[in-house]
Image (cartoon, grey):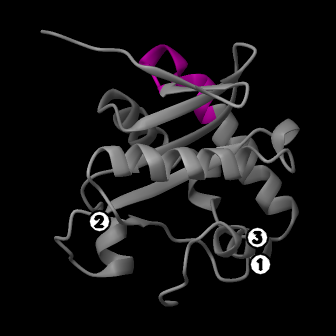
Amino acid sequence: MNMEYTSYRLNGYEISLATSKESDQIISLLKDAAKWLKERQIDQWGFLASGGEDEGIRQAIHNKETFIVKRDGEIVATFTLYHEQTEWDQHVWGRLNDEAVYLHRLALSRSEIGSGLGKVVLQWMVNHLRNEGKSTLRLDCVGDNVKLNEFYLNNGFEMVGTS
């Protein structure tokens, strides 16, 4: 089997595919982000916080759909890009076959909140997907997460509906 490992350097960060040996760190980062949301009365990742998505997270890493962002060798962010709709995506968007990519579980470590890393990661995603011939990146988030909704709107996303 031929395998290629590529990492990208961007503004002092290194973006690469996650490996199974990083699974526990990724899950910990995601659960910390879920805890941070809960502390702010934002019910976005309650199921994830309780361990309900651990296996799905590990599977996405195994399937080479999850990325990590490192600074100075430490994981400071993670995100997953699905090239096919998950059951959740079909629930939110309807069953589509338009070659869109779906963003899930974008999370930054608390130390990076407000650093501009989120914008760097989104710009990298758009460029990376464009290089793959993809032009549509979809995501969903809870409507009452005002700051996150503003963040996405300020970074070129458009709201196309609520459910």
Residue, x 49% and y 90% (percent of image)? 161
Task: Give the mark nearest the N terminus, 3 or 2.
Answer: 3
**CB under 8 Å between callouts 3 and 1?**
no
For the residue carrying disc 2, how many other residues have a C-alpha within 10 Å: few (<14), some (14-19), or many (20+)? few
Q: Is residue 103 magenta?
A: no
Disc 3 target residue: 42
Q: List x then y, in percent, for residue 156.
A: 59, 70
Residue, x 68% and y 36% (percent of image)? 29
Disc 2 target residue: 87
Residue, x 73% and y 25% (percent of image)? 12
Q: Is residue 127 left or right of residue 123?
A: left
Q: State whether residue 142 is above or below residue 85.
A: below
What secondary structure is marked by label 2? helix
State the CA–CA distance, disc 1 to disc 2. 25 Å
Task: Give the mark nearest the N terminus, 1 or 2.
Answer: 2
Disc 1 target residue: 146
Residue 134 occupies quadrant: bottom left
* The one of 158 and 26 positioned closer to us in this rendering: 158
As shown in the figure, which amino acid type bears the numbered disc 1? Val
